[in-house]
Amino acid sequence: MLVNFSSMSDNNRHTGEIMNIAQLRQYIGREEVDYQLLLSALSGYAYPRDKITTWLKSGALIRVKKGLYIFGKEAALTLFSSEVLANLIYGPSAISLNYALNFYGFIPERTTTITSITNKRDKIFKTPIGNFTYRYLTPKKYAIGIELFGFNEKSPFLIASPEKALCDHIHLTDKKIKLATLIDVKHYLLHDLRISEEALDQLRLKKLAEITHIYEDKRLNILKTFIKEWQKNA
């Protein structure tokens, strides 16, 4: 089947070449692709689903979950983005918690699970390219402190700010941790989480205050007070 795409190169457009997986990858422009975009790209085919099935069987496409794919080694030009996929697998969502803290260099431990927050119910996805977990926050708590980040303009993703990621970690993950005093907070941050002193200096007090006001968690209020005193005495 001959296809024509306005965004493909002039050579492909005028010679009417049969679309292969490499041409599809160039047309899509990124490593992550959903089902509707595939159907749109293959609109010139009478049976686009058959073409997709063929690529899945050959490994040219890899199904991350129903309706979401990445390109296999045959067509991939760069590494896929786990962060972009996390946003797409379950949404609305944003990277946060342990993964975000490590992403920013705040904690040394890497995690193979991509951790996110959502204003929908908790969810876990086990996929061929890794595990993705989502923790529920009320819509009001979820919305604050989310930022748009991207290694390039074609692959932006939503991620919690460092301040929000830290608050989420305390608020959602370490609910049993008692942070009643400034000494408690200092020990928790520097020894339990092993956050560097340089990272504590980078936290933005205004952002932290906005988040703690919404979360209404007494431990986060102690955290805010500690960071304020820490930076004042730095």
Image (tube, rainbow, N blue to C red):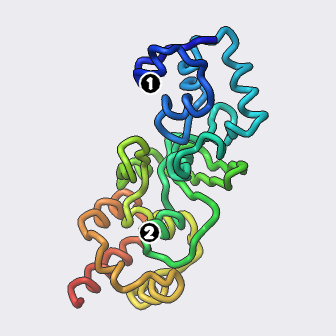
Q: Quick one: 216 or 223, which is closer to the camera?
A: 223
Residue 218 appears anywhere in the view: no
Looking at the rendered image, the quarter that the N terminus falls into is top right
Residue at the spot x=53%, y=64% of the render?
A: 99
Q: Give the residue at mark 2.
A: 166
Q: Earlier in the sequence, mark 1 or mark 2?
A: 1
Looking at the rendered image, the quarter that the C terminus falls into is bottom left
Find residue 170 and report its horizontal and vertical position in percent. Answer: 50, 70
Q: Is residue 54 above or below residue 90?
A: above
Residue at the spot x=52%, y=49% of the render?
A: 78
Amino acid type at circle 2 is Leu
Return the mark for residue 20: none
Q: Residue furthest left?
A: 232
Helix, strand or loop under label 2: helix
Q: Residue furthest right?
A: 57
Return the mark for residue 8: 1
| Tag 1–tag 2 contact (CB < 8 Å) | no
Q: Is residue 114 left or right of residue 156?
A: right
Closer to the eye: label 1 or 2: 1
Q: Quick one: 144 or 161, which is closer to the camera?
A: 161
Residue at the spot x=45%, y=14% of the render?
A: 14
